[in-house]
Image (cartoon, rainbow, N blue to C red):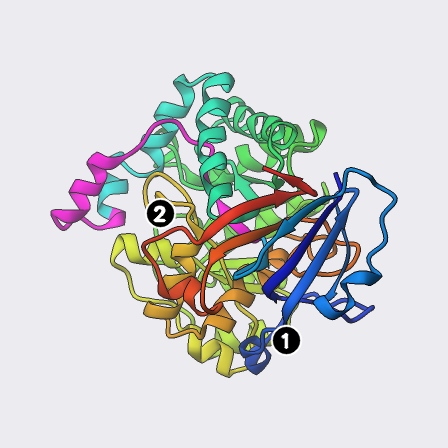
Amino acid sequence: MEILIKNIKELVQIETSEAGKLKVSGSEMAKLPTIKNAFLHIADGKIKAFGSMEDVNSVSSDNNKLKIIDAIGKMVFPSWCDSHTHIVYPGSREIEYIDKIRGLSYEEIAKRGGGILNSAKKMHNASEDELVEQAMKRIDEVVLYGTGALEIKSGYGLNVEDEIKMLRVIKRLKSLSPLTIKSTFLGAHAVPQEYKNNQKAYVDLVINEMLPRVAEEKLAEYVDVFCDRGFFTVEETDRILAAAAKFGLIPKIHANELDYSGGIQVGVKHGALSVDHLEYTGEEEIRILKDSGTMPTILPGAAFFLGMINAPARKMMDAGLPLALASDYNPGSSPSGNMQLILSLACIQYKMLPEEAINAITINGAYAMGVSEELGTIAVGKKANVFITKEIPTYEFMPYAYGSNKVETVILEGVVQ
């Protein structure tokens, strides 16, 4: 399909540099390049050209079936890149939500067999087909809100066969969905009840049995560990990441959600693509991140839903760091994949400017899931994963109007959905 979108009120997050920009950091995050009164030309699933409407006549096409979309009064954005999700899960956990309302903490619920362990029980009894069906419904929903790329983690299996089952489901989703999907192995998400008195044995299982199976079947691009108080230690994380490196798996770490856990440090040590959550991030962590290629990623939905402290986003950006934002879509601590809501939470709760927040879920989100070369900005040659808004006055309206869906038309790989 070949598409010409014309009379775009504002084309947001454009990139004109031939070298290409992988991420934005510090004060640069407050800059959002746009073109007003613009056009966007899409062909063969890629962005072919864009520019001012004054130059629209330069668009050439031999295709008699060129689809023309008039976007007068509307804006075009690159699709959101959600770099941290757990959307493959069986059922929901709203009863634990009531426990939270009654005052139980995340850790208290986990100790009672709830939380991740609750989902693990349900995962064991669910079939691959059931998991695919449930996940596709969630994917279809997030697409409507503008998401064009997802990272999806395992981690609700917690034994060899169920972790492999989850990763096979993610592999099927890649073939069924128009989204760009990346797969992460998260066998070290929690310690199963049967290993509570012998955590080392479970870490050994992850290293000696799970990782080789994941690699053999080529089921994941990334590896993750929940390195935090009450979950996996720095030493255990170090062992797992060192073992995963032998199979070419790149780290993405759950870090510093519950305490100054050392998760950021061990992630950077192993060249993690991202370290995520980061509620407890101090001067030392910022210093270590600044000299690395690791993307600090904040998950506002989880902190909001759990009533936790907010990660120090402003302090991190003022220190010159880049930031990405992701949904953490999961049944226990962030049961929503609405990235427009994440955008609003970033502005309201974390005092990020709209430009900073948009950069965090486009170009920096793409970096955090390893797809910078093909997504995250409006650039010639990149995948045509974009959306057209409804008629909105400014791009600042996107986080401002937090209760409504501002997306009207979604285009993924050059196809109108």
- Spatial separation of the CA atoms under disc 1 and disc 2: 31 Å
Query: What is the x, y in percent for residue 305?
Result: 28, 52
Q: What residue type is labelled 1?
A: Asp
The reply to whether callout 1 and callout 2 are in contact (CB within 8 Å) is no
Q: Which badge, 1 or 2, is on the more N-terminal residue?
A: 1
7 up-or-down from 124: above or below: below
The disc placed on residue 153 is none
Q: How crowded is mark 1: few (under 14 residues within 10 Å), some or many (20 or more)?
A: few
Q: Does 94 sit left or right of 156 as displayed?
A: left
Q: Which of marks 1 and 2 is in front?
A: 2
Q: Which amino acid does label 2 sit on?
A: Ser
Tell me the quarter of the picture where residue 178 sits.
top right
Query: What is the x, y in percent for residue 197?
Result: 35, 36
Q: Name the residue under label 2.
A: 334
Is there any visible trace of residue 362 in the rendered image? yes
Instruction: Residue at 42%, 45% (x, y): give it.
Output: 329
Query: What is the x, y in percent for residue 249?
Result: 67, 45
The disc placed on residue 291 is 1
